[in-house]
Amino acid sequence: GDCGLQDVIAIFKDHEARFSRSFSYWEPGTLELITPSSGAEGAEIKVNTSDLGADISEVLLGGERCQLLGRPTATEARCVVPSLICGPVHLQLSASNGNVLVQEAAFTVIEAVLFGSIDSSVELLDGGLAVRRSTGVNHGVCLSAKPLRLQNMERRFRLRIEEMSSKGGLRALAVGFAALCEVDLMPSGQVRPKDASDLNRAWLVGYDRGGALLCSPKSTQKLTSGSWRPATDLQVGSVLEILLRENQIIIYQDCKERARLFVPVEDGPGQNEELHAVMDLQGAESCISLVSTMDS
């Protein structure tokens, strides 16, 4: 029969009584669509369901309550992705009549990586999603606004080359990770060193000394001939993904692995150290943007 409020007829020995619209009947709800299917903390999403028999009153992602937007209906709700969750999460949605819908791995929460502290020759763009070096070829150190999340025993971030100049000289982009110390930043929050390799504890791949370098706090070594070399391999539109997995730094360019480098355990980051993404915007690369690791 039809869902919603129904009449109830009570039959007694000598009479019957009708109670108009006194019982609410509904079928268990089903999820039809979440738009988009992934997003970062603070992103707006829309959930569409079968008819739940009453307006949606609560949406949970990964057990965390979402802020509802506008006026939900029995088949649709708009809400905001909450904090404290990451990766594939389950959806629990409740209607005011008690109808509850649960769907495992319904949505993927991605980490929004934004630029934070920068050097004197760099400006923030697009709310921290991009940076541009405005002068010179160095003083281009850029750090993520917060430490990268450790997930599945690895940390990662992704960037796109947006602009390149014709003058790079003997310099090139470097990327990697850093455990920040107080001496790395000025009281204003600006990055103090002119090169990211001068940060107190940083692990970087790039630059150019007749080939790319692997820079660690206690050592610097040149990559072997034929390895990834940002001075010659990068162009506008190139996408880099940088991973730190235990004591390995892995570089992907345009979805192809280009370098897999081992950092000695005694010279690597501690297991519980908080690590920021580091980009040293040197050489011809003059503007880069951070992109989601969920983007294609």
Image (cartoon, rainbow, N blue to C red):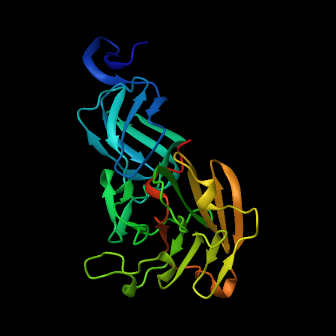
Relative to 258, does residue 282 appear above or below in the rendering?
below
149 relative position to 183: left or right: right
Relative to 121, does residue 285 appear above or below in the rendering?
above
- Give the residue displayed 32% in from the left and 50% down from the top: 126
Indicate the position of residue 59 as horizontal and vertical percent values: 37, 42
| Residue 291 visible at all | no
Q: Residue placed farthest to the right in the image?
A: 225
- Give the residue displayed 57% in from the left and 69% down from the top: 207
Quarter assignment of residue 124? bottom left
Quarter of the image with the N terminus in it: top left
Indicate the position of residue 85 as horizontal and vertical percent values: 45, 57
Indicate the position of residue 66 as horizontal and vertical percent values: 34, 47
Relative to 245, does residue 20 appear above or below in the rendering?
above
Viewer-closest of 155 and 75 = 155
Indicate the position of residue 102 as horizontal and vertical percent values: 49, 40
- Give the residue displayed 32% in from the left and 71% down from the top: 120
256 relative position to 106: left or right: right
